[in-house]
Amino acid sequence: MKWFWQSTVAILILAGTAAAQTPKSGGIMKIYQRDSPASASIHEEATFSNNVPFMGVFNNLVLFRQDAPVNTPETITPELADSWAWSEDKKTLTFKLHPGVKWHDGKPFTSADVKCTIDLLQNKLADKFRKNPRRSWYANVDAVVPNGDLEVAFKLGRPQPSLLSMLASGYSPMYPCHVPTREMRTNPIGTGPFKFVEFKQNEIIRLAKNQDYWRKGKPYLDGIDFPIITNRATAMLAFIAGKVDMTMPTEVTHPILRDIKSQAPKSVCAMVPTNVSINLIVNREKPPFDNADLRRALALTIDRKAFIDILFEGQADMGGALLPGPEGIWGMPKEMLTGMPGYSPDIAASRAEARGLMVKAGYGPDKRLAIKVSTRNIPTYRDPAVILLDQLKEIYVDGTLDIVETSVWFGKIERKDYAVGLNLTGNAVDDPDQSFYENYGCGSERNVTAYCNPELQKAFDAQSVETDVAKRREMVWAIDTQLQNDIARPTIVYGRAGTCWAPEVHGYTQMINSSYNGFRFENLWLDR
């Protein structure tokens, strides 16, 4: 079936076709939203349930091109910064800011707002974020120094080429100095193409066109409505019936895609990698999993091929800490992965080793280990969690699901308020710095398993400075090997997921190496 898979080339053609047409202004677009995020504050949340509806409210200094399927340093484009330049020693990054930009409340955007945003992320101000999941991204920034209203310099402790990519993520909007963080959770003020209108929990999120947007002629839409439909089957029926114009990005599974194309054959769909991994999280500080043998046993019982076949009909990828190729440029090759715990194709041998470790720890057929496996209450988490429970039974572990609502899930695991969990981890930037420091760095909020290896932390810094891609890749693979052997956060699989939109929708490009960066939506338009 030709519609089933759309290659990167096909997606590029779709994007190019939309770009070649003359956009029309007007109309309210409807995109279904899978659940209610805990707040409207992008900097305080860690789910694209937040990015999708709220990214259009804001701007970044720089942004990955919204019509480029692959996020790379070469696709970074100016936004609030007209230009940028590195100092000769690569320890200062200076931005020239766009003049005349206003916040949605009419106040001017200046270099002071850039400094405030980074100071907030570094926890330097009296005003605090309630949660700060990406604080680790900016640990190498010694200071942000304004020079007048329209220039600002980032002073770094050491060279870090990846900083520009992290600033280009949808997770990196600029926040207004004059608005308290508590207000940004419920009434976000940005400079972006859309203004926040309302957020009714479990009902709707609504945005309206910013009539005074600094990019003249944008956005094309009069607004975007995000009706919250928590039942995925109901949401897909709403799309087929034409009640919404787009599915929530990457929520379409392979069976659902077939249903959509059979009932709405004119719809446009893209099934792509997302740089989101399904992973096993184990609280290393909570007995009995402070025992390294038990953590290894859990990793050894995982049958990744079963996850791939059941959830993705064979169309998903095994990987380590970083997205595997060809879409990802840093992931370990398959021949290296097979030597990691639980990655061997000989599942029977891996489970035999796991059972031996369980017996050594005092468990067995007559003394099984009862645990709760925590996971988020949406299908993309619940479905793989059920498979995990079944596989744990093979090594004398009886698990029951602990289902947690989105509004409290991330806070729960960041507090380490769990023993074992099934999690999804999205890498917002396809760069080792983002993954290593955020997910495995000592003290990072997003290091939900409490893994800490001070010697490996030094290796994080060493690879971060390296500019030779081939050398850096070898360093990254060595780090990833250590992470897998340490059972830091076993990656089960990198999924592929789909998005569908009505043929009247133009200007949307599905990104293939991040699910967090493509929702500015200022280029979307409706042909109706």
Image: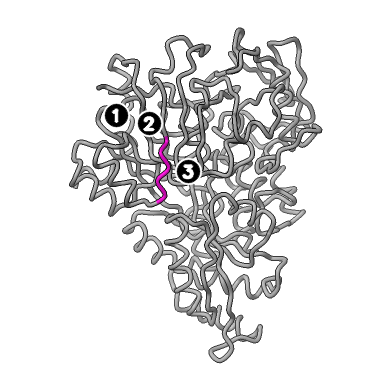
Which residue is identified by label 1? 14
Q: Residues within 10 Å of mark 3 (few under 14, many from 20)?
A: some
Q: Secondary structure at mark 2?
A: loop
Range of residues picked out in magenta: 226-230
Q: CA distance from mark 2 to mark 3?
A: 18 Å
Please identify the quadrant where the C terminus is shown: top left
Residue 157 lies in the magenta-colored region: no
Disc 1 to disc 3, how far (Cα)? 22 Å
Q: Quadrant of residue 165?
A: top right
Q: Which residue is mark 2?
A: 509
Q: Position of residue 161 (x, y in %)?
A: 64, 31
Q: Are marks 2 and 3 in contact (CB under 8 Å)?
A: no
Q: Quadrant of residue 483?
A: bottom right
**Position above or below: 101 against 170:** above
Task: Please give the name of the residue rendered at 31% of the width and 39% of the height, measured from the top-left corner.
Answer: 500
Q: Amino acid at mark 1?
A: Leu
Q: Is residue 140 left or right of residue 218?
A: right
Horizontally, residue 456 falls left or right of residue 306, namely: right
Relative to the observer, which residue lies in front, 61 or 39? 39
Is 155 drawn above or below residue 485 in the view shown? above
Question: How far across and how far down the image is residue 388, in percent?
Answer: 47, 68
Q: SS of the residue at dot 3?
A: loop
First along the sequence among labels 1 and 3 = 1
Horizontal side of residue 238 vs 143, given as left or right = left
Residue occupying the point 51% across, 35% down: 199
Residue 112 screen position, x and y as percent = 73, 18
Q: Which residue is mark 3?
A: 328
Q: Tags 1 and 3 in contact by the CB under 8 Å rule?
A: no
Label 1: element kind: helix
Dot 2 alpha-carbon crowd within 10 angstroms: few under 14, some 14 to 19, many 20 or more: many
Eye-nearest disc, 1 or 3? 1
